[in-house]
Structure formats: structure tokens, C-alpha cells
Image (cartoon, grey):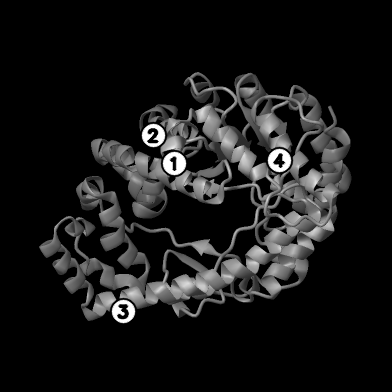
Amino acid sequence: MAAQTRMTPDEKREALFAAWMSTEGKPFASPEVAQTYQRRVQRIKDILQRKKPDQVPSMLLIGAFMAEYAGISQADIMYDYVKGPEAVLKFHQDFQPEYQVVLTYPGRAYDRVGYTLYRWPGSAIPSQALPPHISFQMVEGEYMSANEYDALIADPDGFCLRVFIPRVCKALEGFQLLPTFYTVTEMPFLTFLLGVSGAPPVQQAFQAFLEAVQLTGECLAAYGRATDQLVTQYGIPSFFGGFTKAPFDFLGDTLRGTRGVMLDLHRWPTKVLAAVERLTPIAIQMGLQASALGQHPIVFIPLHKGADGFMSREQFLKFYWPTLKATILGLIEGGAVPFLFVEGSYDERLDLIAESGLPAGTTMWLFDRTDMQNVKKFFGSWACFGGNVPGALFYAGTPQEMEDYVRGLVETVGQDGGFFLAPGIVLDHARPENIHTFLRAARAYGKY
């Protein structure tokens, strides 16, 4: 650990890339598969550094389509640890994408903790259950009241543990009684912590938590065997190694909710600023911890509330960008590569981000609806970018329209390196022939 802290950010990033690219401990089916794996990792490293790899890499963010294609339900993905992993294997075997993005959703664990922040297919909690064929949905609401800003700012972790978690995980309501864990700093105080933890509501919460941990482990093991097989048999690297969020999105997505936070920008602007600044080191730690654990540099950051349609340019500059930038810089300092999923349109933000002084060759940006010519103009000299292939094209377009769109992107914005092909959204619905065409066109037109 001491040696790690003495490394420069570039050295830390190199070490994470080396770990991601390493073949050690990966029983590849053949030397050719190992070479394919390493070549795909190298492409990401090359485009990050604004170089031209052997070809433009392509990636897919697949959601509900994976189950749909395999002929199983969305509930099966969350509850059946035979059918779900088989669906993962079938999709990747049939389409042969360059990278895998497989997220696991252990429905049994969500049931056990009584999770109410989302509804999902097949849930054993009647209020949260959706039909088996429907994908999960967030339940919008205010899970933190406007008069609780001071409590959040004073102790974000404590607020999450004793206030937020009991509100959204009904089986963990006993955590409300837990005292601060700083009681371990003195022997008599530790007795108080352990004594309170023996209260029946706390014991019940711990029991539910431990059982959910076990259920999650079963899910991760089943899906892990499938994703390991994709690496060793087909040379398909896992694309993401960590995740975090913009500090404002922690606040606006699921604490105050969209309506609450947008009103707060006018009613309590000072509180909002103090809260997002307080959440920034937590956002950095979340990304770096996951990246270090997985020995993988890419940290996924979905951007939600900062899009053109959510707030004005002035509000973005005041409330959203400063702490997001600080989070990005903190991840870079730790050797990670922030991968920002820019949902919605950022046409009014591009110049602000480009002129903010982020270091070149350290970030990746996937755009949803932003004009890619503008992206090229403002990002082309310093950042890796991609995206913008419309989800509607995958579902309602023709193969020829898909081929033309991919070719147009490569020829107009992808010829100088630092570019990857990707849809602008997570694909829940698509026509198989259009996915095949997307991947085939990427290989055909993405040559340098």
C-alpha cells in the first residue's frame, strides 16, 4: 500500500491496465484467444491516449434484450441462476461483441432486505413486483426530507446507514438504532455499541443483511462462471471495473428526488452546494475502491441530472460540474479512468467541459443525444469519445440504415483516433439483425 501511494497517477493507471491485460490466472482456450483478449484491452488503452489502434473498438450496453433474445423472462435474469447465465453466454456466443458488460441483479437478495427504491419482475414483495417480462423501474420519490440537509452534510455515511437505508430497505429498519462506530476508539464506549447491537430489531436487521450477502454471493458466483468463460473461451474482456456517480446525482436521483432537488436549487442553494461538496470524496472513494478490488481501470459514471433539459447552463456551472470535475480528477489521481455515460444532450455543456482543464488522455465519454460533430470539435484534441448510435435504430431501423449510420460516424468523427462505436443508450429492445450489422459495420469501416 505504501508503494502504491508513492506512485504517480500515470503509474497507477499503467498498473491497472497491466493487471487488466494480464493473462495470469486466466486459463485461455488457446494462445490465439489470449492474444485476442489482450488486443482488445490494448485498443481501449490506445483510444484513451488518443492513438489509432488497429481498428475502432465497438461496445454494447445490453439491458433487457439479453433475456428477450434468449427467450426467457426478465424475472429469470434476476432469479434463475441457470437460465440467466445461459442467456449471457448465448448472447455473447451468437453476437461475438468485443467487450462484455454484464450487470447482476440478485432478486432474492433485494427481496430479503425489503428493497423499495425499485420495482422489479418476480419480486416476492407484493408492492415491488412487476410482471415477469417487464424490466426493473426506479420508484421516484423524496427519500430525504428538505430539513435533513444538515444531517447529511454532518455525517453522510451515518445518514445513509441510520436514515436512508432503513427507509428503502424495510428489513434493515433496525439499523436506525445503531450508534456511531467511533465508539470503538474507547473500550467502555465499544461496550455500548455491542450492547445496542444486541437489541432484537438490530439483530433482525443484521440477520437479514447476512442472508442477503449469502444470496448475492450465489448470484455472483453463477454469473461469474459465465463471464469467466467469455474471457477464457472467446477473449471478451469485461469492460468496466468500477462505478460511481456525480455527487449531484447522489442527491438528486434517490435522496431528494428530481422534483425535490430542482426546487432546492432555488429554495436552499447553499445547502445543495454544501451537500454535493460533502459527497464528492465519497464518490471518489466508491470508484477507486471498486477499481482497485477488480484490478481494472475503467470506472463507469452515468450522468443523469446535468443534461441540457434538466438545468440551465448557469445552474450546471454552479451546482453540477464543479463537484463532478473534482470527482473525475480524484479518480484520475488514483489511477482510474473515468468513463462518463452522458445521458440526454450535452450540446450546451461541451465547451464548458472542454475548457475546464481536465488532463488529456485520461477520460472516456459515451454520448447519448449530443451532436457528435460538436463533440469532435470540443473533445477531439484531448479526450476519447463515442456513442450516439440511436437506440431507435437498433429496434426500428433497417440493417442498411444501421450500416450507413455506423459508416457515417466513423468517417466524420472517428478518423483521427480516440474514438469508439457504441449505442447512446442501454439496449432493452433491438432486432438481432441490427446488432449483427452494427458489429459487422464496426469491423468493416473501423479500420485505420
Q: Which quarter of the picture shows residue 204?
A: bottom left
Residue type marked 1: Ala
Examine the rendered structure and indicate whether residue 125 appears above or below residue 349: below
Q: Which quarter of the picture shows residue 114?
A: bottom left
Asked if disc 3 and disc 2 are in contact, CB closer than 8 Å, the reply is: no
Residue 243: percent from the left, percent from the top? Answer: 51, 48
Q: Disc 4 to disc 3, how far (Cα)?
A: 45 Å
Examine the rendered structure and indicate whether residue 172 appears above or below residue 57: below
400 relative to 389 in the view: left or right: right
In the rendered image, the quadrant that contains the C terminus is top right
21 relative to 196 in the view: left or right: right
Examine the rendered structure and indicate whether residue 161 appears above or below residue 379: below
Residue 294: percent from the left, percent from the top? Answer: 55, 50
- For disc 3, the neighbor class at 10 Å (few under 14, some 14 to 19, many from 20) is some
Q: Disc 3 to disc 2, how far (Cα)?
A: 38 Å
* Picture residue at 64% right of the left edge, 63% below the top: 224
Nearer to us: label 1 or label 4: 4
Nearer to us: label 3 or label 1: 3
Q: Secondary structure at mark 3?
A: helix
Q: Disc 1 to disc 4, how far (Cα)?
A: 26 Å
Taking depth in this image into account, of 54 and 326 the one nearest to the observer is 54
Residue type marked 3: Gln
Q: Which residue is mark 4?
A: 41
| Label number found at residue 204 | 3
| Label number found at residue 263 | none
Q: Which residue is mark 1?
A: 246
Residue type marked 4: Val
